[in-house]
Image (spheres, helix red, strand yellow):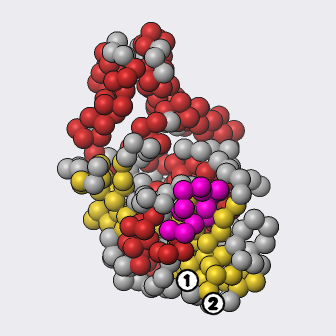
Amino acid sequence: MNVCPRGGGNAHCCMGASCAGGVCALPAPLVSVIMNCRDAARTLPETLASVRAQTFRNFEVILWDSASIDGSGEAALSGAAGLPCFRYFRVAEPAPLGAARNDALARARGELVAFLDCDDLWHPEKLARQVARMRARPEVGLLCTDTAQMLDGRLLRRTFFQWARPVRGRVFAELVERQWASMSSVMVRRAALDSVRTARGWFAPDLQVCEDADLQYRIAARWDCDYLAEPLTVWRIHGNNATLRKFALFAREARVMVERFRREVPDFSTRYAAVERLLLRRASFREAASLWAAGHGAQARQALRGMPGRKAALLRLLSWLPAGCFSLAARLYWRLR
């Protein structure tokens, strides 16, 4: 495999054919696989191995490295052998994940686009099964699979679909309510992506942890969605997982999404009043979790005041404990859910 440092600016690409200006000389594939990376050297080899094992082969991988300093670039290039087409770009300065996903997606050439986080895994039949379904159902803009969860190298007993029942069709409200689609399980039609593109790109460039959900919701409001019931994706949960450590960002970005829906979705606050309440309630819950983790238990309980549900009641009780208990409680949450 030739390394071609001619991507322009701070980027370079590596692929199995000559390139110029970061443009691949190989014929356009059916599927583009988007991988965004920042300091993922520890998990990247196993993730790329799961991509190499795909039985469907008409794909390219676009790996966008946001200023990694842990050897992720070397791990990426080492793991690229055996891939049909691998394109590696590295930028010198990190950006919010929404902006970085846009940068990677701008290089994609496939009619179908799949996303894979650099610590997640795919079953060998994942792409093949999704491509077959997308070909059979041209009205579908977004297709996901069930997702297994892995903590400390061991699969947990429940999958995404076991605690969040999926549905098919125009599922905007249901998807917001239950969020059954992990981003690493999602395949989208390029036409669906382009239908929700704004002047700022496909993903909201200012979002760091909710950019994937925001894109899924906007597609679900305009296109049919579908799912494959088999767990063809593995989502790895670990100590650096954003879900465990970035509750304050989740809270802020959930409110950003609500404000955007109010501007862009006709009659959002009346037509989707339940969705609006749910998103704002989630924001308050995550804000409370963040406050407790920062040692502000009293403020956490204030944020939870009047919030219904067992999770809110449990968090209210936990907030009386020292902030040092947060990590343990978060790990128990993933094991028991």
How many numbered badges does the structure rendering display?
2
Residue corresponding to mark 2: 17
The magenta span reads 64-75
Q: Residue at x 51, y 48 (%)?
A: 213
Q: CA distance from mark 2 to mark 1?
A: 8 Å
- The label on residue 85 is 1
Mark yes or no: residue 141 visible: no
Does residue 33 lie above or below 16 as drawn? Answer: above
Q: Is-magenta flag for residue 286?
A: no
**Do the residues under discs 2 and 1 have CB atoms within 8 angstroms?**
yes
Q: Nearer the viewer, residue 312 or 217?
A: 312
Label 2 Cα crowd, 10 Å radius (few <14 / some 14-19 / many 20+): some
Q: Please report the residue visible at 26 percent of the width from the left and 34 percent of the height from the top.
A: 332
User: Which residue is at a point 44% across and 24% down the rendered structure image?
Assistant: 293
Specify whether residue 301 is in view: yes
Quadrant where the C terminus sits is top left
Choose top left, top right, bottom left or bottom right for residue 26: bottom right
The quarter of the picture where residue 189 lies is: bottom right
> Which residue is rendered at x = 39% and y = 73% of the image?
49
Identity, as a three-letter code, of the amino acid under mark 2: Ala
Q: Amino acid at mark 1?
A: Cys
